[in-house]
Image (cartoon, rainbow, N blue to C red):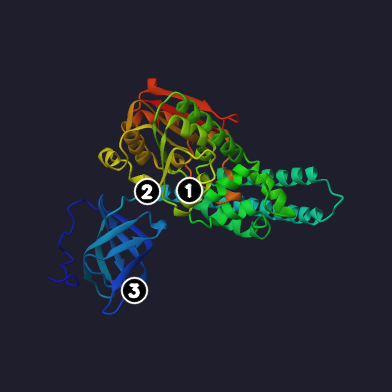
Amino acid sequence: MDFFSADPNQEMRQFNRKPFVTPIGYTVNILTSSEERKLNLRGRTIDISDVGVGIETDHPLAPGHTLFFDDESGLRTGVVRWCMKLDDSYRAGIVMTAKRKPREQYREERGQTLFVHEERERYHELLDRATEQFNRELEDLERRCSDPQEDSEDLFSLVSRSLTTVCEGCEEFERGVRYDKSVIKAAQMGFREKTNPILSKSYFINRARIWPQGCQGDYKTLEGIYKNTPMSEGIGYYLDQCALFSALAIGVRERIIMLRELLKEELLIRENPKVLDIACGSCREVFELAADIEKSGAHFTCIDLDSEALTYSLNRMSYADPSAGEVEFLKYNAIRMFDHELNIEEFGMQDIIYSVGFFDYLPDDFLVKLLHALYQLLNPGGKLIMSFKDASLYKAQFYHWIVDWDGFLQRNKADFGRLLSLAGIPETALTDRRVESDVIIFYTATK
Protein backbone atom coordinates (compact mmCIF):
# COMPACT_ATOMS: atom_id res chain seq x y z
CA MET A 1 0.00 0.00 0.00
CA ASP A 2 1.58 3.30 -1.02
CA PHE A 3 0.88 6.56 0.76
CA PHE A 4 -1.68 7.64 -1.85
CA SER A 5 -3.82 4.49 -1.49
CA ALA A 6 -4.22 3.93 2.24
CA ASP A 7 -7.45 2.30 3.36
CA PRO A 8 -9.68 5.15 4.64
CA ASN A 9 -11.35 2.74 7.06
CA GLN A 10 -8.07 1.69 8.68
CA GLU A 11 -7.28 3.26 12.05
CA MET A 12 -3.99 5.07 11.56
CA ARG A 13 -3.45 6.42 15.11
CA GLN A 14 -2.65 4.99 18.50
CA PHE A 15 -4.26 7.93 20.38
CA ASN A 16 -7.88 8.96 20.69
CA ARG A 17 -8.89 11.63 18.22
CA LYS A 18 -11.27 14.53 18.70
CA PRO A 19 -12.97 16.57 16.01
CA PHE A 20 -11.00 19.76 15.30
CA VAL A 21 -12.09 21.55 12.13
CA THR A 22 -10.38 24.82 11.31
CA PRO A 23 -8.68 26.37 8.25
CA ILE A 24 -4.89 26.20 8.30
CA GLY A 25 -1.93 27.52 6.37
CA TYR A 26 1.29 25.63 6.24
CA THR A 27 4.67 25.54 4.50
CA VAL A 28 6.46 22.46 3.14
CA ASN A 29 9.78 22.10 1.31
CA ILE A 30 9.56 19.83 -1.76
CA LEU A 31 12.72 18.40 -3.29
CA THR A 32 12.59 18.15 -7.08
CA SER A 33 15.25 16.69 -9.37
CA SER A 34 17.05 20.03 -9.60
CA GLU A 35 16.18 22.08 -6.56
CA GLU A 36 14.32 22.40 -3.28
CA ARG A 37 11.09 24.41 -3.52
CA LYS A 38 9.22 26.03 -0.67
CA LEU A 39 5.43 25.78 -1.02
CA ASN A 40 2.94 27.86 0.94
CA LEU A 41 -0.30 25.87 1.06
CA ARG A 42 -3.78 25.93 2.58
CA GLY A 43 -6.01 23.23 3.98
CA ARG A 44 -8.10 22.39 7.04
CA THR A 45 -7.75 20.23 10.10
CA ILE A 46 -10.16 17.29 10.55
CA ASP A 47 -9.33 15.89 13.96
CA ILE A 48 -6.66 16.06 16.62
CA SER A 49 -5.04 13.88 19.30
CA ASP A 50 -2.46 14.37 22.01
CA VAL A 51 0.39 13.80 19.57
CA GLY A 52 -0.87 14.66 16.12
CA VAL A 53 -3.50 16.09 13.81
CA GLY A 54 -5.37 14.96 10.71
CA ILE A 55 -5.57 17.41 7.85
CA GLU A 56 -7.25 17.66 4.45
CA THR A 57 -5.42 19.49 1.66
CA ASP A 58 -5.38 19.81 -2.12
CA HIS A 59 -1.67 19.00 -2.35
CA PRO A 60 -0.23 15.47 -2.23
CA LEU A 61 2.09 14.96 0.73
CA ALA A 62 4.61 12.20 1.39
CA PRO A 63 5.68 10.50 4.63
CA GLY A 64 8.65 12.36 6.04
CA HIS A 65 7.62 15.80 4.78
CA THR A 66 7.97 18.44 7.51
CA LEU A 67 5.10 20.92 7.74
CA PHE A 68 5.43 24.37 9.33
CA PHE A 69 2.02 25.66 10.40
CA ASP A 70 1.06 29.30 10.76
CA ASP A 71 0.60 30.76 14.24
CA GLU A 72 -3.17 31.15 13.96
CA SER A 73 -3.72 27.41 13.78
CA GLY A 74 -2.35 26.85 17.25
CA LEU A 75 -0.08 24.19 15.71
CA ARG A 76 3.66 24.41 15.26
CA THR A 77 5.73 21.82 13.38
CA GLY A 78 4.86 18.28 12.31
CA VAL A 79 6.01 15.38 10.14
CA VAL A 80 3.72 13.56 7.68
CA ARG A 81 3.19 9.97 8.81
CA TRP A 82 0.76 8.91 6.06
CA CYS A 83 -1.27 10.40 3.23
CA MET A 84 -4.14 9.01 1.15
CA LYS A 85 -6.00 10.28 -1.90
CA LEU A 86 -9.72 11.08 -1.66
CA ASP A 87 -11.95 12.06 -4.60
CA ASP A 88 -10.51 15.51 -5.19
CA SER A 89 -8.24 16.08 -2.20
CA TYR A 90 -5.78 14.35 0.12
CA ARG A 91 -5.99 13.41 3.76
CA ALA A 92 -2.84 13.13 5.85
CA GLY A 93 -1.85 12.17 9.38
CA ILE A 94 0.68 14.48 11.00
CA VAL A 95 2.82 13.67 14.05
CA MET A 96 3.59 16.92 15.86
CA THR A 97 7.28 17.46 16.62
CA ALA A 98 6.68 20.63 18.66
CA LYS A 99 4.05 20.76 21.36
CA ARG A 100 0.71 22.21 20.31
CA LYS A 101 -0.53 25.18 22.28
CA PRO A 102 -4.14 26.21 22.80
CA ARG A 103 -5.26 28.79 20.26
CA GLU A 104 -6.00 31.24 23.07
CA GLN A 105 -2.42 30.98 24.26
CA TYR A 106 -1.12 31.55 20.74
CA ARG A 107 -3.30 34.63 20.41
CA GLU A 108 -2.05 35.91 23.76
CA GLU A 109 1.57 35.32 22.80
CA ARG A 110 0.99 36.89 19.40
CA GLY A 111 -0.48 39.92 21.15
CA GLN A 112 2.53 40.11 23.45
CA THR A 113 4.86 39.83 20.45
CA LEU A 114 3.05 42.67 18.69
CA PHE A 115 3.20 44.74 21.88
CA VAL A 116 6.96 44.14 22.21
CA HIS A 117 7.44 44.99 18.53
CA GLU A 118 5.49 48.23 18.91
CA GLU A 119 7.47 49.10 22.04
CA ARG A 120 10.75 48.48 20.25
CA GLU A 121 9.66 50.60 17.31
CA ARG A 122 8.92 53.41 19.72
CA TYR A 123 12.40 53.18 21.25
CA HIS A 124 13.98 53.05 17.81
CA GLU A 125 12.20 56.30 17.00
CA LEU A 126 13.40 57.85 20.26
CA LEU A 127 16.96 56.77 19.48
CA ASP A 128 16.73 58.21 15.96
CA ARG A 129 15.54 61.56 17.32
CA ALA A 130 18.31 61.60 19.94
CA THR A 131 20.89 60.81 17.24
CA GLU A 132 19.62 63.56 14.95
CA GLN A 133 19.65 66.06 17.82
CA PHE A 134 23.18 65.02 18.75
CA ASN A 135 24.42 65.52 15.20
CA ARG A 136 22.78 68.94 14.97
CA GLU A 137 24.34 70.03 18.25
CA LEU A 138 27.83 68.96 17.22
CA GLU A 139 27.50 70.53 13.79
CA ASP A 140 26.53 73.81 15.47
CA LEU A 141 29.45 73.51 17.88
CA GLU A 142 31.79 72.78 14.98
CA ARG A 143 30.83 76.11 13.41
CA ARG A 144 31.44 77.85 16.72
CA CYS A 145 34.92 76.30 16.98
CA SER A 146 36.10 78.52 14.13
CA ASP A 147 35.13 81.67 16.07
CA PRO A 148 38.19 82.93 18.02
CA GLN A 149 35.86 84.70 20.44
CA GLU A 150 34.43 81.43 21.73
CA ASP A 151 35.62 80.25 25.12
CA SER A 152 37.35 76.85 24.88
CA GLU A 153 36.11 75.73 28.30
CA ASP A 154 32.54 76.50 27.27
CA LEU A 155 32.93 74.53 24.05
CA PHE A 156 34.37 71.56 25.93
CA SER A 157 31.49 71.70 28.41
CA LEU A 158 28.90 71.80 25.60
CA VAL A 159 30.47 68.93 23.66
CA SER A 160 30.69 66.91 26.87
CA ARG A 161 27.05 67.60 27.65
CA SER A 162 25.95 66.51 24.17
CA LEU A 163 27.88 63.25 24.53
CA THR A 164 26.38 62.64 27.97
CA THR A 165 22.84 63.30 26.71
CA VAL A 166 23.09 61.00 23.71
CA CYS A 167 24.66 58.25 25.86
CA GLU A 168 21.68 58.56 28.21
CA GLY A 169 19.43 58.10 25.17
CA CYS A 170 21.38 54.98 24.20
CA GLU A 171 21.01 53.64 27.74
CA GLU A 172 17.25 54.27 27.60
CA PHE A 173 17.11 52.39 24.29
CA GLU A 174 18.88 49.39 25.83
CA ARG A 175 16.34 49.28 28.67
CA GLY A 176 13.46 49.77 26.25
CA VAL A 177 14.41 46.77 24.10
CA ARG A 178 14.93 44.71 27.25
CA TYR A 179 18.69 44.40 26.69
CA ASP A 180 18.20 42.23 23.58
CA LYS A 181 21.81 41.84 22.41
CA SER A 182 21.05 41.39 18.71
CA VAL A 183 18.74 44.42 18.62
CA ILE A 184 21.26 46.56 20.51
CA LYS A 185 24.16 45.46 18.30
CA ALA A 186 22.29 46.41 15.14
CA ALA A 187 21.29 49.77 16.64
CA GLN A 188 24.89 50.50 17.67
CA MET A 189 26.08 49.90 14.12
CA GLY A 190 23.42 52.22 12.76
CA PHE A 191 24.24 54.88 15.34
CA ARG A 192 27.94 54.82 14.54
CA GLU A 193 27.20 55.07 10.82
CA LYS A 194 24.94 58.11 11.32
CA THR A 195 27.37 59.88 13.64
CA ASN A 196 30.57 59.01 11.79
CA PRO A 197 30.78 62.18 9.65
CA ILE A 198 31.21 64.31 12.78
CA LEU A 199 32.74 61.90 15.32
CA SER A 200 35.41 60.65 12.92
CA LYS A 201 37.01 64.10 13.24
CA SER A 202 38.29 62.97 16.63
CA TYR A 203 41.54 61.00 16.43
CA PHE A 204 40.76 58.99 19.56
CA ILE A 205 37.10 58.26 18.80
CA ASN A 206 37.87 57.31 15.21
CA ARG A 207 40.76 55.07 16.28
CA ALA A 208 38.55 53.31 18.84
CA ARG A 209 35.97 52.70 16.12
CA ILE A 210 38.15 51.29 13.36
CA TRP A 211 41.04 49.78 15.41
CA PRO A 212 43.73 50.04 12.71
CA GLN A 213 46.08 47.64 14.57
CA GLY A 214 43.44 44.93 14.19
CA CYS A 215 42.53 44.48 17.85
CA GLN A 216 40.84 46.46 20.59
CA GLY A 217 43.01 48.13 23.21
CA ASP A 218 46.16 48.14 21.08
CA TYR A 219 49.35 49.64 22.50
CA LYS A 220 49.19 52.81 20.36
CA THR A 221 45.72 53.65 21.65
CA LEU A 222 46.81 53.10 25.25
CA GLU A 223 49.96 55.17 24.72
CA GLY A 224 47.74 57.99 23.45
CA ILE A 225 45.61 57.72 26.58
CA TYR A 226 48.72 57.76 28.79
CA LYS A 227 50.02 60.90 27.08
CA ASN A 228 46.61 62.55 27.59
CA THR A 229 46.97 65.07 24.76
CA PRO A 230 44.29 65.79 22.11
CA MET A 231 45.48 64.91 18.60
CA SER A 232 42.81 66.68 16.52
CA GLU A 233 41.71 70.17 15.61
CA GLY A 234 38.38 71.99 15.61
CA ILE A 235 35.47 69.97 16.95
CA GLY A 236 37.79 66.94 16.95
CA TYR A 237 39.96 68.61 19.59
CA TYR A 238 37.06 68.82 22.04
CA LEU A 239 35.89 65.31 21.21
CA ASP A 240 39.44 64.09 21.91
CA GLN A 241 39.32 65.90 25.25
CA CYS A 242 36.03 64.19 26.13
CA ALA A 243 37.42 60.77 25.20
CA LEU A 244 40.52 61.36 27.31
CA PHE A 245 38.34 62.55 30.18
CA SER A 246 36.06 59.49 30.13
CA ALA A 247 35.97 57.33 33.26
CA LEU A 248 38.03 54.47 31.87
CA ALA A 249 40.61 56.72 30.21
CA ILE A 250 41.22 58.31 33.60
CA GLY A 251 41.27 54.85 35.18
CA VAL A 252 43.81 53.57 32.64
CA ARG A 253 46.21 56.43 33.47
CA GLU A 254 45.76 55.77 37.17
CA ARG A 255 46.25 52.05 36.54
CA ILE A 256 49.72 52.46 35.06
CA ILE A 257 50.75 54.62 38.03
CA MET A 258 49.52 52.05 40.55
CA LEU A 259 51.13 49.20 38.64
CA ARG A 260 54.46 51.00 38.75
CA GLU A 261 54.06 51.48 42.50
CA LEU A 262 53.17 47.83 43.13
CA LEU A 263 56.11 46.57 41.09
CA LYS A 264 58.54 48.98 42.72
CA GLU A 265 57.47 47.79 46.18
CA GLU A 266 58.28 44.21 45.15
CA LEU A 267 61.60 45.05 43.49
CA LEU A 268 62.82 46.86 46.61
CA ILE A 269 62.45 43.75 48.78
CA ARG A 270 63.65 41.06 46.36
CA GLU A 271 67.00 40.01 44.94
CA ASN A 272 67.28 38.79 41.37
CA PRO A 273 63.53 38.18 41.01
CA LYS A 274 62.08 36.59 37.89
CA VAL A 275 59.19 38.69 36.57
CA LEU A 276 56.70 37.76 33.85
CA ASP A 277 54.68 40.52 32.15
CA ILE A 278 51.72 39.05 30.24
CA ALA A 279 50.27 40.92 27.23
CA CYS A 280 52.87 43.58 27.87
CA GLY A 281 51.87 46.14 25.23
CA SER A 282 54.11 49.22 25.28
CA CYS A 283 55.84 48.25 28.59
CA ARG A 284 55.67 51.83 29.85
CA GLU A 285 56.00 50.70 33.49
CA VAL A 286 59.10 48.62 32.66
CA PHE A 287 60.82 51.60 31.05
CA GLU A 288 59.95 53.82 34.00
CA LEU A 289 61.36 51.23 36.44
CA ALA A 290 64.60 50.68 34.54
CA ALA A 291 66.83 51.86 37.41
CA ASP A 292 64.95 49.73 39.98
CA ILE A 293 65.12 46.70 37.70
CA GLU A 294 68.87 47.03 37.34
CA LYS A 295 69.40 47.62 41.06
CA SER A 296 67.39 44.53 42.04
CA GLY A 297 69.00 42.31 39.41
CA ALA A 298 65.53 41.40 38.16
CA HIS A 299 64.95 39.46 34.97
CA PHE A 300 61.80 40.63 33.16
CA THR A 301 60.19 38.51 30.43
CA CYS A 302 57.64 40.60 28.54
CA ILE A 303 55.32 38.66 26.22
CA ASP A 304 52.82 39.87 23.65
CA LEU A 305 51.38 38.60 20.37
CA ASP A 306 51.76 42.02 18.71
CA SER A 307 55.19 42.18 17.05
CA GLU A 308 54.89 45.93 16.56
CA ALA A 309 54.25 46.45 20.29
CA LEU A 310 57.34 44.38 21.12
CA THR A 311 59.51 46.34 18.68
CA TYR A 312 58.23 49.61 20.14
CA SER A 313 59.04 48.42 23.68
CA LEU A 314 62.50 47.17 22.72
CA ASN A 315 63.35 50.51 21.11
CA ARG A 316 62.08 52.38 24.15
CA MET A 317 64.21 50.29 26.52
CA SER A 318 67.30 51.14 24.49
CA TYR A 319 66.93 54.70 25.79
CA ALA A 320 66.71 53.66 29.45
CA ASP A 321 69.41 55.28 31.58
CA PRO A 322 70.74 53.33 33.25
CA SER A 323 69.62 50.45 31.05
CA ALA A 324 67.55 47.73 32.69
CA GLY A 325 69.49 44.69 33.86
CA GLU A 326 67.73 42.00 31.93
CA VAL A 327 64.53 42.66 29.98
CA GLU A 328 63.56 40.09 27.38
CA PHE A 329 60.80 40.64 24.82
CA LEU A 330 59.10 37.55 23.46
CA LYS A 331 56.32 37.06 20.95
CA TYR A 332 54.00 34.59 22.60
CA ASN A 333 50.27 33.88 22.69
CA ALA A 334 49.21 34.33 26.31
CA ILE A 335 46.02 32.32 25.87
CA ARG A 336 48.23 29.21 25.65
CA MET A 337 49.23 29.66 29.29
CA PHE A 338 46.48 27.57 30.88
CA ASP A 339 48.77 24.50 30.92
CA HIS A 340 51.15 24.38 33.89
CA GLU A 341 53.64 21.91 32.40
CA LEU A 342 53.92 23.96 29.23
CA ASN A 343 54.41 27.13 31.30
CA ILE A 344 57.24 25.52 33.26
CA GLU A 345 58.91 24.42 30.03
CA GLU A 346 58.57 27.85 28.40
CA PHE A 347 59.22 30.22 31.32
CA GLY A 348 60.15 28.38 34.51
CA MET A 349 58.86 29.33 37.95
CA GLN A 350 58.40 33.04 38.60
CA ASP A 351 58.53 35.44 41.54
CA ILE A 352 56.19 38.06 40.12
CA ILE A 353 53.59 37.62 37.38
CA TYR A 354 51.43 40.53 36.32
CA SER A 355 49.03 41.70 33.66
CA VAL A 356 46.78 44.74 33.36
CA GLY A 357 43.78 44.98 31.02
CA PHE A 358 44.25 41.59 29.36
CA PHE A 359 42.14 39.60 31.82
CA ASP A 360 39.12 41.84 31.17
CA TYR A 361 38.83 40.38 27.66
CA LEU A 362 38.78 36.70 28.61
CA PRO A 363 35.56 34.70 29.12
CA ASP A 364 34.96 33.31 32.60
CA ASP A 365 35.76 29.66 31.97
CA PHE A 366 39.07 30.36 30.27
CA LEU A 367 40.04 33.10 32.71
CA VAL A 368 39.60 30.70 35.63
CA LYS A 369 41.93 28.15 34.00
CA LEU A 370 44.51 30.80 33.15
CA LEU A 371 44.57 32.36 36.63
CA HIS A 372 44.87 28.91 38.19
CA ALA A 373 47.85 28.09 35.96
CA LEU A 374 49.57 31.42 36.64
CA TYR A 375 49.14 31.04 40.39
CA GLN A 376 50.73 27.59 40.14
CA LEU A 377 53.68 29.12 38.30
CA LEU A 378 54.67 31.25 41.30
CA ASN A 379 57.53 30.39 43.61
CA PRO A 380 56.67 30.33 47.35
CA GLY A 381 56.14 33.95 48.38
CA GLY A 382 55.62 34.94 44.75
CA LYS A 383 52.89 37.37 43.73
CA LEU A 384 50.33 37.45 40.94
CA ILE A 385 49.25 41.05 40.24
CA MET A 386 46.11 41.55 38.15
CA SER A 387 43.73 44.40 37.39
CA PHE A 388 40.06 44.50 36.43
CA LYS A 389 37.63 47.19 35.32
CA ASP A 390 34.68 47.44 37.73
CA ALA A 391 31.55 47.79 35.57
CA SER A 392 29.50 49.02 38.52
CA LEU A 393 31.51 52.26 38.56
CA TYR A 394 31.30 53.44 34.94
CA LYS A 395 28.67 53.76 32.21
CA ALA A 396 29.29 51.41 29.30
CA GLN A 397 27.43 53.43 26.65
CA PHE A 398 30.38 55.66 25.71
CA TYR A 399 32.50 52.58 24.95
CA HIS A 400 29.74 50.58 23.25
CA TRP A 401 28.06 53.34 21.21
CA ILE A 402 30.30 56.39 20.78
CA VAL A 403 33.29 54.13 20.17
CA ASP A 404 33.34 50.43 19.34
CA TRP A 405 35.22 49.18 22.40
CA ASP A 406 33.10 46.32 23.71
CA GLY A 407 35.64 43.50 23.87
CA PHE A 408 36.21 43.85 27.61
CA LEU A 409 33.57 42.07 29.68
CA GLN A 410 31.26 43.83 32.11
CA ARG A 411 32.18 42.45 35.53
CA ASN A 412 31.95 43.75 39.10
CA LYS A 413 33.65 42.99 42.39
CA ALA A 414 31.37 40.04 43.13
CA ASP A 415 32.34 38.52 39.77
CA PHE A 416 36.05 39.00 40.50
CA GLY A 417 35.73 37.28 43.86
CA ARG A 418 33.88 34.36 42.33
CA LEU A 419 36.40 33.89 39.51
CA LEU A 420 39.41 34.08 41.80
CA SER A 421 37.83 31.50 44.08
CA LEU A 422 37.11 29.17 41.15
CA ALA A 423 40.75 29.58 40.09
CA GLY A 424 41.78 28.03 43.42
CA ILE A 425 43.31 31.20 44.84
CA PRO A 426 42.59 31.30 48.60
CA GLU A 427 40.80 34.39 49.85
CA THR A 428 43.44 34.70 52.57
CA ALA A 429 46.11 35.06 49.85
CA LEU A 430 44.42 38.10 48.31
CA THR A 431 44.75 41.82 48.88
CA ASP A 432 43.08 44.49 46.77
CA ARG A 433 43.60 48.17 46.02
CA ARG A 434 41.66 50.56 43.85
CA VAL A 435 42.96 53.36 41.70
CA GLU A 436 42.10 56.88 42.81
CA SER A 437 38.87 57.07 40.79
CA ASP A 438 37.87 53.54 42.01
CA VAL A 439 36.95 52.39 38.49
CA ILE A 440 39.80 49.83 38.31
CA ILE A 441 40.70 47.38 41.05
CA PHE A 442 44.02 45.57 41.56
CA TYR A 443 44.24 42.16 43.18
CA THR A 444 47.53 40.75 44.45
CA ALA A 445 47.60 37.01 45.18
CA THR A 446 50.53 35.80 47.30
CA LYS A 447 51.60 32.15 46.93
Badge 3 or badge 2: first in the primary sequence: 3
Query: Is 54 rendered above or below residue 61?
Result: above
Which percent across, then down, holds residue 138?
73, 53
Mark pair 3, 2: CA separation: 48 Å
Q: Amino acid at mark 2?
A: Asn
Q: Residue furthest right?
A: 149
Residue at disc 1, secondary structure: helix
Residue 382 appears anywhere in the view: yes
Residue 112 appears anywhere in the view: no
Q: Amino acid at mark 3?
A: Arg
Picture quadrant where residue 364 is located: top left
Residue at disc 3, secondary structure: strand
Badge 2 or badge 1: first in the primary sequence: 1
Q: Residue 333 — which label? A: 2
Residue at 27% over, 72% down: 60
Q: Amino acid at mark 1?
A: Leu
Q: Residue 37 — which label? A: 3
Disc 1 target residue? 314
